[in-house]
Image (cartoon, rainbow, N blue to C red):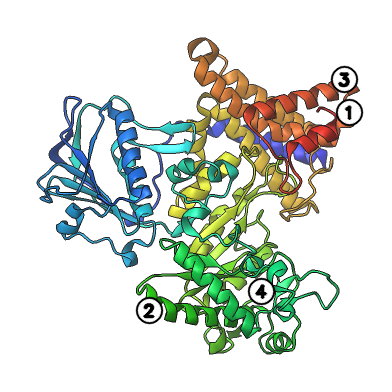
Amino acid sequence: MKKLIALLLCMILAMCALTACQNSEVNEGGDENKEETEMTDIDLITNGRTDYKIVYPANATEFEMFAVNELVYFFNQATGISLVKISDEGADTSTSNKYLSVGQTSVFEASGITATRDELGPNGFKIERKDNTVFLVGNKDTGTMFSVYEFLRLNFHYECYHKDEIKIDQNVSELKLADFHVLKRPDIDLACANYGELIFDPTFAYRRGMLIDEDMFINVGGNFWHNSFNYLPPHTYAAQHRDWYYYGNGESAEPTQLDYTNDEMRLALTEVLKQYLLDNPTLENITITHQDNRQWCNSAKNLELREKYGTDAASMIIFCNKVAKDIREWLNETDPGREINIIMFAYFATEQAPTRYNEETGSYEPIDSEVVLDEDVCVFYAPINADYNSSAYSQANVNMYNTLQQWKALTDRIFLWTYSTNFDYYMGMFNSFDSMQSIYQMARDAGVYYIFDQGQFNSSVSTGFSRLKMYLNSSLAWDVDADMDMLIQDFFDNYFKGASVPMKKLFDSMRLHYAYLRDDTNMDRSIYANIINENYFPKGVLDGWMDIIDEAYDSIADLQDTDGTLYRALEDRIKLESLSIRYLLIEIHGSTYTSNQLYRMKSEFKLDATKLGMDRYKERNGALNFLWSEWGVL
């Protein structure tokens, strides 16, 4: 087996040496949405000056003002020019003015240009020139924000690879105005930040074309998910309303789920939900999601529905449909026209949809009309048991594909929760690279509205080429058919710069090895797989990867004398990726070192991880202090 692994590594290293690429142009994604633009004879910038001003709505939202400030900042980075920004209050609305109109300004309202929800969705946008004025606008303010980044991309080749690696042209002193007629809508309307590095730094998420939970969902008692008990806390209601809850057939002293067939409970929860809608007038997504366990109520009504439909999802759909009907009647009186999505989980007991397969049509259909989701009800499908090492269209993922098609038969608005890390081993690389694009394409084809490709959501800094995943996740949500190889190469060239070739060689070698583990060993493919096994990671393989890390350090050595700041940044980026290999060497092959050698390796690992800002090594009980204690390096 070791000879086979060595042969595979030699092949991939040789291939990388022969095919090392030069810097590639940025793949903007979503090109099918975008019309070609020609240049006008109007000066955007001439002699290092501009006559253009930003105009924004007098009642601008936080996102609109953020967009304005981002435009000011990056325009200055590219040109040295500080754009003047003015409110639209009392502004001349003629398009003969040299305006960059950001958002739905009075200038936009007078222009005759549209920005409808049907054409743009929540995050899509238009960049439109009319006479001298350029409009940067979305149907929602988040779309307006993303229009600014596209404007910067089209004019100055802006691209954000990571929070500390943003590319943009410099010293631009001459630029004609393009005849912009751009309409861009992401293939998946909503992409949620999925790694702690994005979640804890919303600006980074926005610059990557993603939003965070708080931007999209109403927080129910501190939780977006598994929040049924946040609506009706057992410690508040269970004493007087024990029948609202399920206690695991009496086996549990504490309730484990709500009884979703209890009408009195439903009415109480609906009143709580109304208050959350009142408290959050600008948000449209709110979840009613069951607790994070596999149990479901066994009341007589639940058992009857389970027998009829073959799944506990039926009781949840019927419950949410009734809630939605009551909420819609209430909104028609209190806030007519407000759009809302009440979202339930397809997860554990509710994963399977109440559908049947029609042999004549070759498609799934509802068992009956009772389980068709109301127009205000959506499903959040979380295929936790899928194989994220393999293509979405592989035999290993037939159940995920079919289940998605089943839910598509019940609703035209699906939220999708996928997984892209090993939650017990944050330090290892998880090869979701081989499934990622196919999952996003499958999602687009199924009409998925929102995707959360869960990564190391609670970790401040992640190794295992997680930063590449952040770049790919956001890029593919906008254009699922983007050239993934080009995206990967572009990331390596701009993020690792002079170390691009060896780091790409390391990535390719690791990816090939993980494919070998998937295809030719009995290694568990789950998101909780135990990877601490010398048969999976022989010392020779890990040592070979560390040799490539040394090549990467050598490739940037000259920068120590010419650009110390860049050298230190690249050194840290290489070091971050070395941690996933060093962790496996310590955990699997620690016995091959002397006690002094092993202690030094652990101490150096701790020093580097701390310097780089890492704080977790697994999802639960995973603070690094626990690892330092286990290693004896407190």
**What kind of residue is marked 4?**
Thr
Decide which of tag 1 and tag 2 comes sooner along the chain: 2
User: Residue 544's x, y, as percent?
Assistant: 73, 29
Picture quarter containing residue 167? top left
Decide which of tag 2 and tag 4 comes sooner along the chain: 2
Residue matched to label 1:
592
Residue matched to label 2:
333
Residue matched to label 4:
350
Of tags 1 and 2, the one toward the viewer is 2
User: Residue 168's x, y, as percent?
Assistant: 36, 32
Decide which of tag 1 and tag 4 comes sooner along the chain: 4
User: Residue 29's x, y, as percent?
Assistant: 40, 49
**What element does badge 3 sit on?**
helix
User: Is 235 on the left-hand or right-hand side of 30?
Assistant: right
Local crowd at mark 3 within 10 Å, few (<14), some, or many (≥20)?
Answer: few
**What kind of residue is marked 3?**
Asn
**What kind of residue is marked 1?**
Thr
Decide which of tag 3 and tag 2 comes sooner along the chain: 2
Of tags 3 and 1, the one toward the viewer is 3
Residue matched to label 3:
596
**What kind of residue is marked 2?**
Glu
Q: Is residue 594 visible?
A: no
Q: Please tell me whether residue 351 is drawn above or below residue 561 in the rendered image.
A: below
Name the residue located 52 percent from the left edge and 46 percent from the top edge: 472
**What element does badge 2 sit on?**
helix
The quarter in which the N terminus is drawn is top right
Q: CA distance from mark 1 to mark 4?
A: 48 Å
Name the residue located 51 percent from the left edge and 43 percent from the top edge: 471
Q: Please tell me whether residue 604 is drawn above or below residue 540 in the rendered image.
A: above
Counting labels gives 4
Q: CA distance from mark 2 to mark 4?
A: 33 Å
